[in-house]
Image (tube, rainbow, N blue to C red):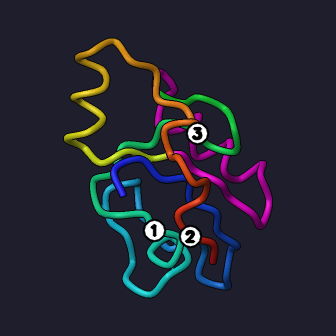
Amino acid sequence: PFVSLCRMEKTSSGFGCHLFSQVVKGGPADKAGLADDDGVVEVNGVNVEKSSHAEVVEMIRRGGNTLEMLVASKNVYKQLKDKGMTITPRLVGEGPSSQA
């Protein structure tokens, strides 16, 4: 999917992604549909496009054991932004791409 709403539950090893650039295969993020180099648009319903890495990490920590991220593939993110479009969950279409 080009725009995905990924929902995941934390396991003993975390959510299964590192610095939003590497997705651990078989981890919660992978099972929820997150891919390497996806652009993170929202975390738990809050837009984070202008947030620092530290701010996003803190939001994830405050969210507890459940995480929902709206993400867009790198190319689609750039195309939508170049057109001045706001990326929202409405672009997902059918709703969450997956749940883990």
**Residue 78 at x, y = what percent?**
23, 30
Quarter of the figure with the N terminus:
bottom left
Residue 88 as seen in the image, left or right of residue 76: right
Q: Residue at x 22, y 28 (%)?
A: 79
Query: Is 60 contained in the magenta span?
Result: yes
Q: In the rendered structure, which segment of residues is drawn in magenta?
A: 50-70
Label 3 residue SS: helix
* Mark 2 touches mark 1? (CB < 8 Å): yes
- Label 2 residue SS: strand
Report the label total: 3
Mark 3: which amino acid? Pro
Identity of the amino acid at label 2? Ser
Cα–Cα span, label 3 and label 1: 15 Å
Q: Which residue is mark 1?
A: 33
Answer with mark 3 or mark 1, whichever residue precedes in sequence: 1
Please tell me how crowded label 3 is: few (under 14), some (14-19), or many (20+) other residues with Cα within 10 Å.
some
Query: Which disc number belongs to residue 98?
Result: 2
Q: CA distance from mark 2 to mark 1?
A: 6 Å
The residue at the point 30 percent across, 35 percent down is 77
| Label 1 secondary element | loop
The quadrant of the image that shows the C terminus is bottom right
